[in-house]
Image: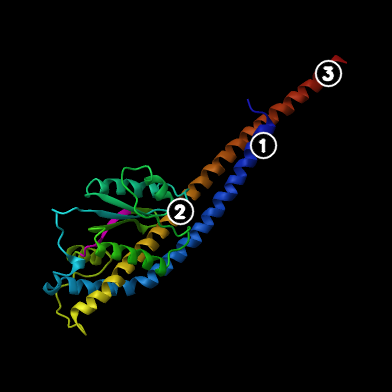
Amino acid sequence: MANGQEIRFRMRAIRQTLQVTKAMDLISTAKLRKARRILEDTVPFFTRIQKSLYDIVSGAGMIQNEFIKRIDKNKAFHSAVLLVSSDKGMAGGYNANVFKTVNTLCTQLRNPLLLPVGNIGSRYFAHSPYPIVENFSFNSQLPTVDDAQILAYYLISQYLWGMFDEIHIVYTHMYSTVRLVPTIRQILPLDAEKMQAAITESGGQKRIALGFEYLPSTHAVFEALVPLYIKGMIYGCLVEAYAGEQSARMEAMNESSKNAEKMLADLQIYYNRVRQANITQEMTEIVSGSVGL
């Protein structure tokens, strides 16, 4: 049976932990609000690019473009998987769900190559059978458009060079603060059907071939829009994954705080009982001593 001093030590440790979890909860809440505000401000611009690119890709004149080339199953084939994890832990099952989705996806791809974004993902897949080509990290900061541009430039250059034949991104889509779903999206090659599905999923209406005229030419506009489209897609995925991470950490810290408060209340009751027992024992000894006199 623990004495009063041991119980006080445990209670002090729990109070210190409770201060940390509540502070992390507040920090994650502030970061989540900022990330969602930035995402809401930038989504309309990139959505407009996505729709314009879909209008071009869905036309018959761009079928032979290298960004929408047909997959040749006879040649050596490599699939790149850009997986977005966190740089820090204590986010509940956020990273574990992403890793599970990536492992499932890799079993369905030919020669998968991994591109982890985040230190947790890099450490986890360092011991996996899938080779890691490059690591990326944003040091737990809110991703910026420049960060997305670095990734987009790297992916496009490697794709055009022939290092990757197809590129997928796995990130956490935040439907709400309590519903975080790992999601897979294909970045390259461009697929009109998947682009239409993404537009519809984001709240847009089903688009049809409207027959726009592009100046100076359809090819020139297409070549200019592709990097912007890929950068916008990656940026949206990064920010949404960052918001999902903060939401998961906020929920995890909230549950941790509740558990700590419950443990503290239980220990307080136990401490009161031990203290009362000690007082009763001391009073009994005093009474017994006085009777002996």
Q: Which residue is mark 3?
A: 289
Q: Could you give the CA–CA distance between mark 3 and mark 1, rounded to whole angstroms?
A: 30 Å
In this image, 121 relative to 279: left or right?
left
- Residues rendered magenta in the picture: 182-190
First in sequence: mark 2 vs mark 1:
1
Q: Is residue 186 magenta?
A: yes
First in sequence: mark 3 vs mark 1:
1
Q: Which residue is mark 1?
A: 8
Check the image and name the residue furthest to the left: 60
In this image, 241 relative to 192: left or right?
right
Check the image and name the residue furthest to the top: 292
* Camera-nearest residue between 219 and 36: 219
| Magenta highlight: main SS | strand
Image height of 205 relative to 218, above or below:
above
Check the image and name the residue furthest to the right: 293
Residue at 26% x, 48% y: name it.
106
Image height of 125 relative to 218, above or below:
above
